[in-house]
Image (tube, rainbow, N blue to C red):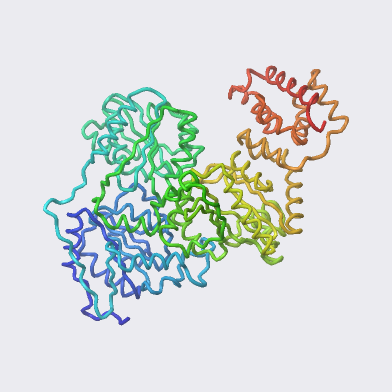
Amino acid sequence: MSHPRPDDTPDTTAWCALQASLAARGERRLVLLEGDRENNLRWLSGLLPDLEIHTGIWTGPADQSPDPRLTGILPTEARKWLGREVSTIVWDGWQGNPPDAFAALSGALTAGGLLFWLMPPLEEWPRFADPDYPRTGLDHGGKHPFAARMADILADHEAVIRIAPGSADTPSPAIPQVPEQSFRIATTRDQEQLIQRLVRFGMGRRRRPVVVTADRGRGKSAALGMAAAELLKKGRQEVVVTAPLQQNVDTLFSHAREALADQLEQVSAGTLTTRSGGRLRYVPVRELLAVRPEAEVVLVDEAAALPAPLLKSVLLGWPRVAFATTVHGYEGAGRGFAIRFRQVLEQSTPHWQSVTLTEPVRWAVSDPLEALISRIFLLAADGSGSAGTKQSGTGKLVIEPWQPAAAGDEALSNAFGLLVDAHYRTSPADLRQWLDDPAARSWRARIGDRTVGILWCALEGGLSPELAEQVSLGTRRVRGHLLPQSLASHSGYPEAAVLNGLRVVRIAVSDAARRSGIGRSLVEAARAYTAEQGIDYLGTSFGGSADLLAFWQTCGLHVVRMGLQQEASSGEYPLQMIKGVSQPGLELEERIRNRLAGHWLTLVPDNWPGLEPDLLADITADLPPELALDGDDLRDLWNFANGHRGFQVTVPVLRKLSQRPGIMARLKGHEELVLWCRGVLQGRPWSSLQADRLCRGQKEGEDRLRKLVRDLVKDGPGL
């Protein structure tokens, strides 16, 4: 590629005409600037000053921005722009290309917008050393199927304008025909109907939550803002909005402010106050749950980016709550949110309402950039295309190794769609990791040619003893190797990082094929692989829940660790389980489990005081039994159950009783399970138990526990 000639400058007239034409058509374009980065930046510096830029973004080094009107951000900060609007993006791919961030910013681009992407020539992408890779544990060696797939798609897509400044021929862009009637951003019929629905909901009966789902750019945030304004006009005094970040609600507040107009008394950051005293304000979700302000209506925007337990607390904490989220989203698969959260809604508020927006607002239906981004990142991946056993007849189930990077787009989309549907937070970054990680091992379940299940695993461990010891000391951390590093550093077993493990990253079975043993068959295929390859153990790490724990137990795995911090994505504590395969692996499993069992009763009250009783009971039952109850213990239990021995001095023995074989399994279905878990295992004070309506007071609670212990001592197993 030659260096730019003095006259190698962009035809600014043509590019301005392109911008005007796209705005009139309601379309956007990706401009792929291939080749030498310095050439491309000089070319951009000659073009951008003549373009109309309302809000622009630059992701490269601040001192190298090609136009002073561009706001510099780090690529990883793109999530902050969810719900906002930009007219121009200059993405410096030479600094790294995190897929979630790129897709997020593309969704903020409005009609007439141009997304300039600085990258090497397409033919070099399969081996491009993306600077973002080390952050994820991926390395630069070998081929990168994810980038190669992107290059194939971009090569001749109608939404892409390929420019190579400095080459022999740098053509001017083709100008699409301007339509007779220009596109304009206006309230769609979908939005109008949603606003009406939200106003009825906000003025209507309690416990009728609304869940709004839409693809990016459908104007759900704008509709929420206009509905909030209408509610204040109709007399509501306190409408609260929450979201992952305050920036996420900028569009909402902008439309609310415009709709209220001269009715506003005061405008401040995150708060609108009307002349009649009504107020719309933003409150961060954790502050909302901690302070619990009086609010007649609570609106939750970008709901899929918030942990499900927090959403449930909001749902149950206020009389009228509406949730809005993106269905095919880079902020964490909104469809997974819809599926998981639907269960909570059905149980807690069976009269909930669902609304879907389909018509785009920020761009026209014909916009080719939306289809391009969706295809590249599989934002519309749908597991329903992989029909389950009900649609697949009675064909034979086949479990086989599978290479996603070698699959066609339809098969890959169906498989990735299963992962999206099954997991609360699956994003384009996971797709890149799945395709590009050389340590990935995958299996699929199919009936005929239909994929009904997917298992994605990763080889981990195999560190040198010296490095494993440093990891155990906390002085080193190695990218990747999630499970062995956790067992080495947190559980204190450096040998877990020296041994080789196979960790289950994701498992998914199509909805129609569940409850038929396909998941267990996939896990068994992975276990057989570990045995064949001399791998020491099979393991998994997931946001702890009673149903997932039960599944992994049926697969033969056992609990070895529970994390002390709730996961940001799920709001649940990470639970780690393994199954030893080799002799060293079996010995490791036994040692870690025995040590955790010995520490369990001390760890629970201080670290997991709010853990759900069902999950706490199941984990306690899964651990190896500790020391048997001796004669003194049995006497204390008898005196507590049949006399007046104090509860506080008996707690150590009651906790010890919890670890006897069969006791927690028996308590699992008992009406006093919650009182036992909260009062005995988690050590909650009686005032807290009374406040949670678990007992009427200490005496009544103790009397119920005395009766329970009488039954356990009389009939309990292993006593």
Residue at left offset 65%, top offset 24%: 671
Q: Nearer the viewer, residue 269 or 676?
A: 676
Judged from this view, the residue extending furthest toward the front is 394
Residue at left offset 61%, top offset 48%: 520
Residue 240 visible, this orientation: no
- Indicate the position of residue 329 as horizontal and vertical percent values: 40, 49
- Which of the 4 quarters of the picture holds residue 477? bottom right
In the rendered view, tell whether residue 348 sits above or below residue 4: above
- Indicate the position of residue 343 as horizontal and vertical percent values: 49, 35
Q: Nearer the viewer, residue 470 or 331?
A: 331
Q: Nearer the viewer, residue 328 or 476?
A: 328
In the rendered view, tell whether residue 155 sits above or below residue 197: below
- Which of the 4 quarters of the picture holds residue 702? top right
Q: Nearer the viewer, residue 406 or 672?
A: 406
- Indicate the position of residue 479 as horizontal and vertical percent values: 57, 61
Q: Is residue 359 left or right of residue 717?
A: left
- Which of the 4 quarters of the picture holds residue 17? bottom left
- Quadrant (top left/top right/bottom left/bottom right) for the N terminus: bottom left
Residue at left offset 42%, top offset 59%: 99
| Number of marks | 0
Residue 58 visible, this orientation: yes
- Quadrant (top left/top right/bottom left/bottom right) for the C terminus: top right
Judged from this view, the residue extending furthest toward the left is 180
In the rendered view, tell whether residue 496 sits above or below residue 614: below
